[in-house]
Image (spheres, grey):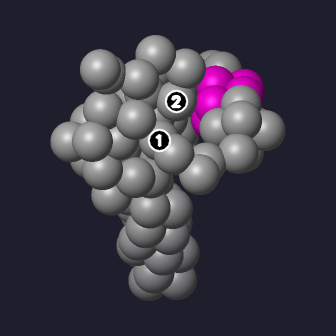
Amino acid sequence: MIYYLVEICGWIGSLSYSIYTIPQAIDAYKKGRTNGLSSAMVWLLFLGSLCSLIYILPDYTSPFFYNFGISLITTSIIMRYHYIPRK
């Protein structure tokens, strides 16, 4: 029983953590730029997501795989518009 509660908490936490970048990615896509975002924040988020995804790949812990996968995708979108804004 406790295992399932811990598993559910893992999924809820991972999904919550991964979706926080989605609004910024949508905003960057719509506007075509990311005015006001720190380059350091963008790079640290990207590096953290990439390294964390690589770290969990051998064990394939599902909640974390989706968490860091989604975060890596949305951060890549943010990074694209941060460095190559649409004109």
What amino acid type is highlighted by mark number 1?
A: Thr
Residue density around tag 2, few if under 14, some if 14–19, many if 20 or more, within 10 Å: many
**Closer-to-camera residue (37/4):** 37
Q: Is residue 66 visible?
A: no
The x and y percentages for residue 67 are 47, 47
Answer above or below: position of 51 versus 12.
Answer: above
In this orientation, which residue lies closer to the viewer: 9 or 26? 26
Q: In the displayed structure, would residue 37 be above or below residue 81? A: below
Q: Main secondary structure of the magenta part?
A: helix
Residue at which label 1 appears: 34
Judge from the rendering whether residue 37 lies leftward or rightward of residue 35; answer left or right. right
State left or right for residue 56 relative to residue 33. Answer: right
Instruction: Say which quadrant the N terminus sits in.
Output: bottom left
What residue sits 21% from the left and 42% below the top?
Answer: 30
| Above/below status of 18 relative to 25 | below
Q: Earlier in the sequence, mark 1 or mark 2?
A: 1
At numbered mark 2, what does the secondary structure look like: helix, strand or loop?
helix
Q: How many marks?
A: 2
Query: What is the C-alpha distance between the residues marked 1 and 2?
Result: 5 Å
Residue 28, percent from left and from top: 35, 41
Q: Are marks 1 and 2 in contact (CB under 8 Å)?
A: yes
Residue that numbered label 2 is attached to:
82
> Is the residue 86 above or below the residue 21 in the image?
above
Residue 7 position in % (x across, y down): 46, 67
Q: Which stretch is magenta?
A: 46-53
Circle 2: residue type: His
In the image, is 36 to the left or to the right of 10?
right
Instruction: Choose between 21 and 30: the one closer to the eye.
Output: 30
Crowdedness near tag 1: few (<14), some (14–19) or many (≥20) residues, C-alpha within 10 Å: many
- Under tag 1, what secondary structure? loop
Q: In which quadrant of the rendered image does the C terminus lie?
A: top left
Identity of the residue furthest to the top in this view = 84
